[in-house]
Amino acid sequence: MWSTPLVGGLMLVSLFPGFLDRLFVMFLPLLTHNTTPMAESGGDLIPLARGVGAVVGALALATLGTTRIRGALVMPIALICAATSALFIFAPWLALSLAILGVAGFLRAVLSSLTTTMLHTVVPDSLRGRVMAI
């Protein structure tokens, strides 16, 4: 896995955002309560905004088809995804928090789909199950 630079790079790109994103989702209620005014009134909207963004992201990626531009999108999307999660902490208004979470959900869905698809197409059939298990 590490001997192929593309596979190793994709694993690293998917490892850190995936790990940090899971932590972010676990601490989302705490972050919302401590940073966003009126979080109690819009608490149900917080996970909804992220989910709507994820659905829109998956549909947007599906419209791209099998273009070659997909590979070039991985790193910029990973960096912007991390930045939106950090921006959420500093959002002073509920509406801005919801918009940021929608963008974060959009980017996370696109990033996850891109890295998984690229790994499936690059890794040989005999090793695919082992690599995807990691």
Image (cartoon, rainbow, N blue to C red):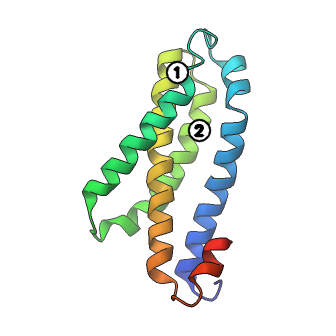
- Neighbor class of circle 1 (other Cα within 10 Å; few <14, some 14-19, many 20+) is some
Q: Quadrant of the C terminus?
A: bottom right
In what quadrant of the picture does the N terminus appear? bottom right
Relative to 8, is 27 on the left or the right?
right
Looking at the image, which residue is at 56% across and 25% down? 46
- Residue at the image position 50 percent from the left and 28 percent from the top: 48
Between 69 and 109, the one lying in front of the other is: 109
Say what secondary structure mark 1 lies in.
Answer: helix
Q: Which mark is residue 85?
A: 2
Q: Which mark is residue 20?
A: none
- Whether residue 64 sits left or right of residue 8 in the image: it is left
Q: CA distance from mark 1 to mark 2?
A: 16 Å
User: At 34% from the left edge and 54% from the top edge, which residue is drawn?
Assistant: 61
Q: Residue at x 58, y 30 (%)?
A: 88
Answer few, some or many: residues within 10 Å of disc 2's Cα (few below 14, many 20 plus, some between 14 and 19).
many
**Residue 15 x, y percent position in the rendering:** 65, 62
Kindly identify which numbered label has been placed on residue 45: 1
In depth, the one of 65 and 36 nearer the eye is 65
Sequence-earlier tag: 1 or 2: 1
Name the residue type under label 1: Leu
Quarter of the image holding residue 36?
Answer: top right
* Marks 1, 2: nearer the viewer: 1
Q: Is residue 120 left or right of residue 11?
A: left
| Rendered view: 80 above or below 113 | above
The relative height of residue 13 versus residue 108 in the rendered view (above or below) is below
Total marks in image: 2
Residue 86 picture location, percent across and down: 61, 37
